[in-house]
Image (spheres, rainbow, N blue to C red):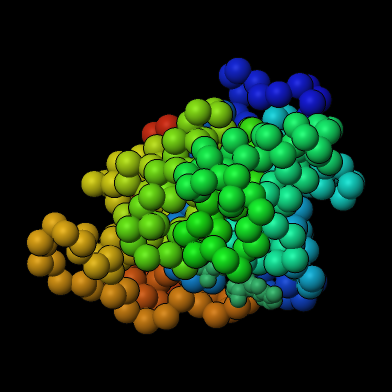
Amino acid sequence: MTLESGPSATGPILEVNDLAVSFGRGAWPAVRGLDFRLNPGEVVGLVGESGSGKSMTAYSLLGLLPFGARLDRGSILFQGEDLALLPPKARRNLLGRRLGMIFQEPLTALNPVYSIGEQVAEIFRIRAGLNRKEARARAIELLGQVGLPRPEGAYASYPHRFSGGMRQRVVIAMALALNPDLVIADEPTTALDPTIAAQIIRLIQSLTAQRGSAVLFITHNLRLLIGLAKRVLVMYHGLIVEELTDFQDLRHPYSQGLWRALPPEPGTGADRRLIPIPGQAPGPGELIPGCAFAPRCPQAQEICHRELPLLKTLAPARRVRCHLSC
Ligand SMILES: Nc1ncnc2c1ncn2[C@@H]1O[C@H](COP(=O)(O)OP(=O)(O)OP(=O)(O)O)[C@@H](O)[C@H]1O
Ligand SMILES: [Mg+2]
């Protein structure tokens, strides 16, 4: 299958095998061997504390690793084609067209010297070959779809005139303009207040569902993924430690810790005590023998400090990397 042939009806849209990324030519591993897949149209969550390697995973999929980072090994099969082997120009071509990215900080994704509308229209002009008039019309239509009031007026506005939530709507418009088959959203609501964040999540959910795009939704907040992601990958120190579909059935002590550390849901009146995970996540490049979570794990046994547990498959879409779980 070629990259132009669209998603396969049956196979995964993305299949990542043994993906590893490091800084300092292997000296500081950031991602240590990830295996996961996304099916067409599926929303999958990727969750973990700061520094667990979520963004480096996203950037390696998109071919946007920062200076100093390198892909050490692994394959990234996107609709059957290995992105890791594609030349940079071919990868850049996929961005926007087949792969969309929604960044955490919308300001960095928008150019301050062009109007909002020009930036959206440019995608239609340059990437879809529309003329100026058509591109403008499509951009205005899309700005309306992402919920900007008076889209014609918004077209001519500059990014600094918009609130964070409005800017994020524009970034979503740009990411989804060409109906990509896969959208990667890296903490798209972290900079927003909870009400706006909820609106933005609903927007991503409804627009990607309309387009049939698969979504990898990255967050440090497990609760955000309820009702959004059908499947969740929990990441710790560069590795997947759990894959789950049922939020009531968290098996890895780290996933359980993430859940207990969440404040009660606002507005529910729940009065649950917040229990932070003890200790600190390992620093960049820190080498920890055995299970990297063992030094913080209330249930750790001697073997946990000695041997890295395998990521065991318990059932389809159900994996756990823990000596104590089976
Ligand atoms: N530019 C960089 N130079 C060196 N190390 C880096 C750089 N960017 C990230 N790292 C390291 O790579 C590891 C993974 O970082 P990454 O940004 O993927 O984490 P993350 O899970 O996205 O965290 P956050 O929730 O804070 O965004 C961390 O140990 C981090 O310190
Ligand atoms: Mg990040």
Residue 82 percent location from the top left of the image: 77, 38
The quadrant in which residue 28 appears is bottom right
Tell me, yes or no, if residue 44 can be seen here.
no
Q: Residue at x 81, y 38 (%)?
A: 132
Residue 290 percent location from the top left of the image: 49, 68
Could you tell me which quadrant the N terminus lies in? top right
Residue 106 percent location from the top left of the image: 59, 62
The residue nearer to you, when weighing 142 against 271, is: 142
Question: Relative to 100, does residue 112 appear above or below in the rendering?
Answer: below
The residue nearer to you, when weighing 3 against 197, is: 197
Q: Residue at x 81, y 32 (%)?
A: 130
Question: Relative to 87, does residue 305 appear above or below in the rendering?
Answer: below
The quadrant in which residue 181 appears is top right
Residue 94 percent location from the top left of the image: 77, 40
Q: Residue at x 79, y 26 (%)?
A: 4
The residue nearer to you, when weighing 229 against 52, is: 229
The quadrant in which residue 213 appears is top right
In the shown orientation, is residue 56 left or right of residue 52?
Answer: right
Farthest residue, direction top: 9
Question: Relative to 218, does residue 302 appear above or below in the rendering?
Answer: below
In the shown orientation, is residue 13 left or right of residue 204?
Answer: right
Tell me, yes or no, if residue 295 can be seen here.
yes
Question: Relative to 189, does residue 212 appear above or below in the rendering?
Answer: above
Number of disc labels:
0
The residue nearer to you, when weighing 116 against 91, is: 116
Q: Residue at x 42, y 48 (%)?
A: 201
In the shown orientation, is residue 237 left or right of residue 82?
Answer: left
